[in-house]
Image: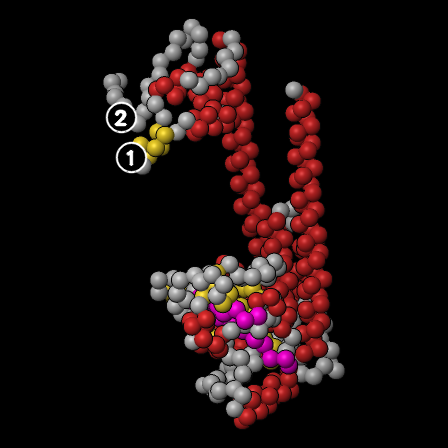
Amino acid sequence: MTAIHCDHFIRMRFDRAVVISEYLRLVGDSASVRAKVASLFVSTAGQKTVNQAHVGSITISLPPLAEQHRIVARVEELMKLCDALEQSGRLADEQHARLTSTLFDAMAASESAHALAKNWQRIAEHFDLMLDRPEAIDALEQTILQLAVRGLLVPQDANDEPARSLRQRIHSERAGLFASGAAKREKTLKPVEEGEAAFSLPKTWAWVRFDELVRADKPIAYGVLVPGPDTPDGVPFVRLADLSLHSPAAKPEKSISADVDAQFARTRLEGGEILLGVVGSVGKLGVAPDSWKGANIARAICRVVPTSLVDRRYVLNLLQSEFMKIRFIGDTRTLAQPTLNVGLIRECPTPLPPLAEQYRIVARVEELRCLCAQLRERLVEARRTQSQLADALVAEIA
């Protein structure tokens, strides 16, 4: 077969009595030679190139011809083994994903404490097999949140003030703020109808609109629409990239001018607000630390300030649950990016437990999440030990 190559290639021919091309191909694929080639790059017409002189200057190790053949044969053997292991690993991953999805979904969908116990037993029988990788622990943590918002994580107490009474107190508080002029009246939302309920709730719980959990004088609101150029020493400006539930920066990276901030005083932060992504990364969450007091937020974020009559930590757990995430993603509108309207957040049907049970749920979730963190650490330690063992074996062979 006759063929020619373009000028982006360099053709090399070697004396096969001294070196075999298969061995040189392996050498050329090695990290050390690739790094050497990269160090010789020059930019020509916006592209990185190397020339024949660069390639010819590279020094390589050359074993005897017979050993080259043995090296090539051994590498091919090991690569076939790696391919087989990779294929086996993919199959195992798929099987594992199906197993965890099936069992965790069944547990999250439990309709009673009895069904939950039965579904948990199925997981317990495969515990070590299922929770041997980080994504399975993530799925377990999400299942915990699903159970929490369905009233299946902690037992109900008949002595608790029922959620319908708590709701009445919330409405009384809101009415007082409206009457005093401290809060502006929003459009009245209809009660949650039976067909909107995603699942059945314990008798002491109630379905409410999400907006009923929010302070009337601090309504859900978008942030700054047009921030303008970054202003050194201006008003700190919180973007989606700044949101974090665990380790937010002491101060946002960007700032806006005081003139722009003055137009959006309604979303100026006091510290402690829940911040929710509503453009692009819909559902991304963060909590404003006290050090962000006086900062403002981007249009891609909305501020949520729960009423003092509910536990803010329960609201945060609720927003992290797959139940709420699915509702929000399903309600997005696609403009330039997926966008969630604040009005849809306000209207979202939301499960509300008695306040005392909210406290118990939060405590139980925190306890179980600590256990999940310990499981993750065990996995990291096990993999670290495996790596150290492999290094020791290789060093011993060498």
Please, which colouring scheme is shown?
Answer: secondary structure
Q: Quadrant of residue 315?
A: bottom right
The percent position of residue 193, horizontal first and vertical second, equals 50, 82
Mark 1 closeness class: few <14, some 14–19, many ≥20 residues within 10 Å: few
**Which residue lies most toward the bottom here?**
179
Camera-side residue of 375 and 244: 244
Numbered marks: total: 2
With respect to residue 316, does 384 lie above or below? above
Camera-side residue of 294 and 349: 294
Task: Say which quadrant the N terminus sits in.
Answer: top left
Left or right of residue 339: residue 392:
right
- Of tags 1 and 2, the one toward the viewer is 1
Say which residue label 2 marks: 6
- Going from N to C along the chain, the mark reached first, 1 or 2, is 2
Disc 2 on helix, strand or loop?
A: loop
**Is residue 124 inside the magenta stretch?**
no
Return the mark for residue 45: 1
- Which residue: 51% across, 59% down? 253
Q: Main secondary structure of the magenta part?
A: loop
Mark 2 closeness class: few <14, some 14–19, many ≥20 residues within 10 Å: few
- Which residue: 58% across, 76% down? 306
Disc 1 on helix, strand or loop?
A: loop
Residue 109 in view: no
With respect to residue 172, does 76 lie above or below? above
Range of magenta residues: 293-309
Task: Say which quadrant the C terminus sits in.
Answer: top right
**What's the CA distance linking mark 1 and mark 2?**
17 Å
- Which residue: 68% across, 33% down? 388
The percent position of residue 349, horizontal first and vertical second, equals 52, 76
